[in-house]
């Protein structure tokens, strides 16, 4: 059998945002441990798994955080695969971790936090947007190589997925977080021909459950 010509193979990488998290205190959990999927979040993960069940998935990667691993689990089970952990898919660093930030709580009311808001373009309160995009692209490149000619799944978080999308589309990193197209349990799908990106698509397998989810920071 003749080997395929370079750049003639199509590979798909699905970037999956985790499902809803159990977070009764509505804090910004960031990289904090022990934040697990809620009951609704597990239903969302099951819907993603069902959506991808008939896809040619041969490689699954997850952020090390519990909510991502728990979202990846049913996808992996439906394909008989093990989940590989990749710190490059981790949530963004954020100095506001553990605070109830919705509506400005714990930030604008605390003068000690004001110094962290001097440069929203970087942002000054956490990991630079450009760094997020760079590490996520590296994770995607590796997953694409390991699933060459098939499909890969990376379960990650809203900020890393969205920053990578902005970079791919050549858009500025400065944005309104409320306008990110990256809902809970959504898929941002990258299709490659060889190493060249052919298309980017977005879908929401758990759309029917989104109205039941908590909104705002820490959702």
Image (cartoon, grey):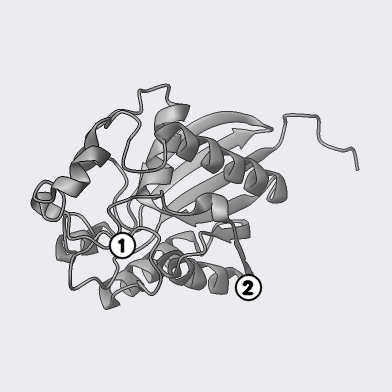
Q: Residue at x 24, y 70 (%)?
A: 23
Badge 2 marks a residue whose secondary structure is loop
Q: Quadrant of residue 180?
A: top left
Query: Which class describes the residues within 10 Å of circle 2: few (<14), some (14-19), or many (20+)?
Result: few
**From the image, which quarter does the C terminus lie in?**
bottom left
Q: Nearer the viewer, residue 60 or 57?
A: 60
Q: Quadrant of residue 170?
A: top left
Residue furthest to the front in view is 112
Q: Nearer the viewer, residue 206 or 37?
A: 37
**Pointer 2 or 1: first along the chain:** 1
Q: Nearer the viewer, residue 125 or 143?
A: 125
Q: Which residue is mark 1?
A: 29
Image-based side of 121 in relation to 107, left or right: right
Q: Residue at x 35, y 28 (%)?
A: 173
Mark number displayed over residue 186: none
Total labels drawn: 2
**From the image, which quarter does the N terminus lie in?**
top right
- Marks 2 and 1 sit apart, C-alpha to C-alpha, by 31 Å
Q: Which residue is mark 2?
A: 80
Residue furthest to the bottom in view is 39
Where does the image place residue 164, in percent across and percent down from the top left? 45, 36
Where does the image place residue 89, in percent across and percent down from the top left? 51, 52
Q: Residue at x 59, y 52 (%)?
A: 152
Q: Nearer the viewer, mark 2 or mark 1?
A: 1
Where does the image place residue 6, in percent across and percent down from the top left? 78, 29
Where does the image place residue 165, in percent across and percent down from the top left? 42, 35
Residue 125 lies, with reference to residue 101, above or below; the image says above
């Amino acid at each position: 059998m003749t080997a395929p010509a370079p750049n003639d193979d199509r590979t798909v990488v699905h970037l999956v945002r985790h499902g809803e998290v159990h977070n009764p205190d509505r804090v910004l959990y960031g990289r904090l441990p022990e934040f697990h999927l809620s009951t609704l979040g597990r239903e969302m993960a099951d819907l993603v798994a069902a959506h991808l069940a008939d896809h040619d998935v041969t490689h699954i990667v997850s952020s090390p955080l519990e909510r991502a691993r728990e979202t990846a689990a049913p996808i992996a089970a439906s394909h008989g695969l093990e989940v590989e952990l990749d710190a490059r898919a981790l949530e963004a660093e954020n100095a506001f971790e553990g605070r109830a930030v919705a509506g400005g709580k714990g930030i604008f009311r605390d003068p000690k936090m004001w110094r962290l808001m001097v440069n929203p373009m970087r942002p000054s309160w956490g990991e630079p947007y450009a760094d997020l995009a760079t590490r996520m692209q590296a994770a995607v490149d590796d997953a694409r190589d390991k699933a060459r000619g098939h499909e890969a799944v990376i379960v990650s978080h809203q900020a890393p997925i969205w920053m990578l999308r902005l970079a791919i589309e050549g858009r500025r990193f400065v944005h309104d977080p409320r306008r990110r197209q990256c809902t809970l349990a959504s898929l941002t799908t990258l299709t490659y021909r060889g190493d060249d990106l052919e298309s980017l698509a977005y879908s929401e397998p758990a759309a029917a459950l989104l109205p039941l989810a908590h909104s705002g920071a820490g959702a």
